[in-house]
Amino acid sequence: MEGDLAHIGAGLAAIGSGAAAIGVGNVAGNFLSGALRNPSAAASQTATLFIGIAFAEALGIFAFLVSLLLMFAV
Amino acid sequence: MATEPISEEVVGSCVDSYGSAIGMPQLCFDWFPNQIFWLVITLVVIFLVLSRVALPRIAAILAERQGTITNDLAAAEDLKAKAVEAEEAYNKALADARAEAQRIAAEARAEIQADLDEAIVKADAEIAAKAAESEKAIAEIRAGALESIQIVAKDTAAELVTTLGGKADADAISKAVDAQTKG
Amino acid sequence: MATETTEAEGSSLVFHPMDQFIVKPLFGDGGIAWYTPTNVTLWLFLAIAAVFGLLVLSTSKRAIVPTRMQSVAELAYGFIYKMLEDICGKEGVKYFPYVMTLFMFIVCANFLGMLPMSFTTTSHFAVTIPLALAVFLTVTVLGFVKNGAAFLGLFWVSSAPMALRPVLAIIELISYFVRPVSHSIRLAGNVMAGHAVIKVFAGFAAIAAISPVSVLAITAMYGLEVLVSFIQAYVFTILTCVYLKDALHPSH
């Protein structure tokens, strides 16, 4: 049954969400450790932080999208 | 979601006969023209509203507030300068008044001193005159007293002589008394 | 396919996480032509109303000492203005109405989508792809108009070693063309994912034993989604600013 294979694929693609979580955690954690070392520079870099998080998260969203496509659109 | 099946020709390829989605509604290309059409209208309306009305107005409000704040600060600065000026003037007036008061006091003191001196001189003169007069009166009195003494002595001598049984010779008595009193 | 299987399995657990995204005509049951007023129309117009109320009605008194709503409008204005000025410099200020339009539309549409029973316009690729494409085309056209052929310097990394430059150029080129894709899918994907997850938790509430957990989970997800609604609007806007900066100052 091709439907079952598609579901397996969807589950595998969802692993990508976890990978994106690692990426987002990395960005935020490094920002935090940098900000604690030099708090005066932190405020000016929040925009960069959000851009970094957005890029990391976008790839996770791609994985999510692939998962959804396999579930609903194949 | 709908409990009754709906007619097949209405639902199209994206919704099944129970009103549930077939696949992802986001990927239903039948609906794209509709969504894009209304989105474009929305964006154009929002853009026009923002660029014609909202943003200039908010910019004006912010600029006005900035202006008001600047003006108020300038006014406050002005008022502060005025206050400092007023305080200076007050201090100056105070110093002037103090100097004037001192001058007046000194003048008054000098005047009083002069009056006093004059009065003292006058009083001294008066006192001297009085003293002189008094001395004269004393001298007179003293002179008067000598004469009185001689008269009393002569009278007494005459009385004595008469009492002793002699005959009082006035000339002799007065000569004797004179001689005694001069002696 | 998935919905069919869940429906076939039983009556107690029925998941329709995607049904909330179905476009329906507002009047009648007819088909959907390009001009048909649909629930998309309704919620887009509500977004217009929200923007209008927030930025126009609230400032109608032009108070020097702002009311609460007016200070929200001023806050939004200052927030986007400062973002644009920080990233693009003085030349970027010209494009402020454009950026502000994008931000206000996305933020209002996202928050309206958080209302129960509402339709979330920004969860549709049909909405976010035109937004991202508009930014992409604006930036590309603006880059060539402002800088001419020098705009291609964006892809030619002059600080890299000569041998690496062609490789980097290809990578830069690819990443340039992926921009509108990631730009649009990020917004729609985030919003859609959150709403679908909430719907799935809501489906679990049908089982009495786990319904309290389900309600708690919905509450938590709702809080997260409110945050995501704002952050995605912010990210969309800030990336627009970054792309605009590339068009205005293409040198690396």
Image: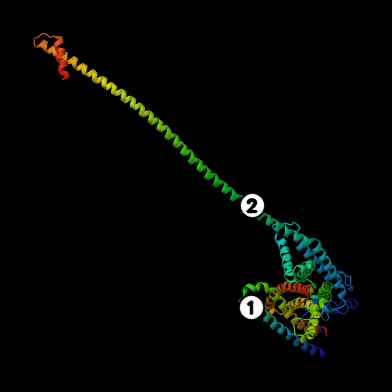
Residue nearer the viewer, B72 or B172:
B172
- Parent chain of label 2: B
Q: Amino acid at mark 1?
A: Gly
Which residue is labeled 1 in the image?
A: A34
Image quadrant in which the C terminus of chain C is located: bottom right
Q: Quick check: can you spot residue B124?
A: yes
Q: Is C48 left or right of C231, judged from the image as shown?
A: right
- Dot 1, crowdedness within 10 Å: few (<14), some or many (≥20)? few
- Parent chain of label 1: A
Residue A40, x across and y down, in percent? 63, 72
Query: Do the residues marked 2 and 1 share a common chain?
Result: no
Residue C219, x across and y down, in percent? 69, 74
- Dot 2, crowdedness within 10 Å: few (<14), some or many (≥20)? few
Which residue is outermost to the left? Answer: B165
Residue C44, x across and y down, in percent? 81, 69
Residue nearer the viewer, C186 or C82:
C82
Cα separation, mark 2 vs mark 1, equals 47 Å
Which residue is labeled 2 in the image?
A: B78
Mark closer to the observer (2, 1): 2
Image quadrant in which the N terminus of chain C is located: bottom right
Residue C168, x across and y down, in percent? 78, 84
